[in-house]
């Protein structure tokens, strides 16, 4: 089993909401993950470059300002082109504009290549459980 528990965490696009990012950083670090936090106002390329530089196994994208869907178009393809074909990708938060049926939102992001999609207000413990599962770590 690969012992690498490195993840890249950040807030995508023109979103400058930092509080949730700091909370996730703390909780994931406490859970034993090596968190590379690229902060707010991050581009797809920032996530990809950090993942390559740190040999990360996962990219965790956060968005609160509602434009995450637009910010993530083509993200999986860029990861693949950069050689990150096996990288696990999560996204969560307020990732679309307006009220939309969650199942429709989730399906769109899964179709965009994300492995897991979390709605607003999801407890960070759910991400930890899923990361351990996706990394093949038994708890």
Image (cartoon, rainbow, N blue to C red):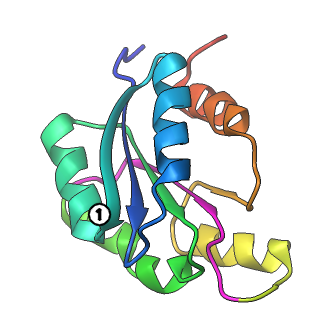
* Side of 113 relative to 79 (left or right): right
Question: In the rendering, at what x and y percent does residue 41 appear?
Answer: 32, 69
Q: Secondary structure at mark 1?
A: helix
Residue 27 is one of the magenta-drawn residues: no
Question: In the rendering, at what x and y percent does residue 66 appear?
Answer: 60, 80
Magenta span: predominant SS is: loop
Q: Which residue is under mark 1?
A: 80
Q: Residue at x 86, y 80 (%)?
A: 101
Quadrant where the image shows the N terminus: top left
Question: In the rendering, at what x and y percent does residue 9 appear?
Answer: 40, 47
Question: In the rendering, at what x and y percent does residue 4 appear?
Answer: 34, 21
Q: Residue at x 48, y 49 (%)?
A: 21
Q: Which residues are magenta?
A: 83-97
* Side of 47 relative to 105 (left or right): left
Q: Residue at x 72, y 69 (%)?
A: 106
128 versus 17 height, above or below: above
Residue 96 is one of the magenta-drawn residues: yes
């Amino acid at each position: 089993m690969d012992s690498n528990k490195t993840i890249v965490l950040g807030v995508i696009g023109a979103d400058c909401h930092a509080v949730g990012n700091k909370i996730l950083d703390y909780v994931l670090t406490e859970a034993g993950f090596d968190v590379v936090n690229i902060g707010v106002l991050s581009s797809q390329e920032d996530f990809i470059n950090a993942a390559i530089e740190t040999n990360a196994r996962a990219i965790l994208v956060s968005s609160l300002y509602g434009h995450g869907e637009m910010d993530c178009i083509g993200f999986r393809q860029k990861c693949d082109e950069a050689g990150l074909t096996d990288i696990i990708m999560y996204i969560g938060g307020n990732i679309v504009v307006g009220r939309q049926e969650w199942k429709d939102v989730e399906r769109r992001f899964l179709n965009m290549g994300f492995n897991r999609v979390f709605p607003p207000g999801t407890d960070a413990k759910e991400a930890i459980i899923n990361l351990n599962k996706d990394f093949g770590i038994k708890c």
